[in-house]
């Protein structure tokens, strides 16, 4: 992975105000990311130096749950994680690799 990758969550839809709060609560818990809102987009910057397997798994789950373009997550695949990320049996595989 590069030094930093910026992912875009565009016009995320929330079911309620608690759902929106849960989304941001989950993002805040992931080590190695910072985010900022720009118009109807949320820019999520992933810092390579402290982005762990656990952090990537959590980000995959959030992107999946909130229907954010998962193809962007391919930019986070590197030699340290490709063995488990590029798994055709994983629930995220189609959304990440078969657009």
Image (cartoon, rainbow, N blue to C red):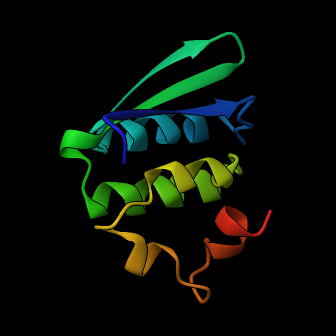
* Quadrant of the rendered image containing residue 9: top right
**Extreme right residue here?**
99
In the rendered structure, the answer to whether residue 17 lies left or right of residue 40 reads left
In the rendered structure, the answer to whether residue 15 lies left or right of residue 35 reads right
Q: Residue visible at 71% across and 73% down?
A: 94
Q: Residue visible at 56% across and 82% down?
A: 90
* Quadrant of the rendered image containing residue 91: bottom right
Q: Which of 5 and 30 is in front in this view?
A: 5
In the rendered structure, the answer to whether residue 41 lies left or right of residue 35 reads right
Q: Residue visible at 48% across and 42% down?
A: 22
Q: Residue visible at 38% across and 61% down?
A: 78
**Extreme top residue here?**
39
**The C terminus lies in quadrant:** bottom right
Q: In this view, does 84 lie above or below 62?
A: below
Residue 19, position as x, y percentages in the image: 59, 41
Residue 45, position as x, y percentages in the image: 42, 29
């Amino acid at each position: 992975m590069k030094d930093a990758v910026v992912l875009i969550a565009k016009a995320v839809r929330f079911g309620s105000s608690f759902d929106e709060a849960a989304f941001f609560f989950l993002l805040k818990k992931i080590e190695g990311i910072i985010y900022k809102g720009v118009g109807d987009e949320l820019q999520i910057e992933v810092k390579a130096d402290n982005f762990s397997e656990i952090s990537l798994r959590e980000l995959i789950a959030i992107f999946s749950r909130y229907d954010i373009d998962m193809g962007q997550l391919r930019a986070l695949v590197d030699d340290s994680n490709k063995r488990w990320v590029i798994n055709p049996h994983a629930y995220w595989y189609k959304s990440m690799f078969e657009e």
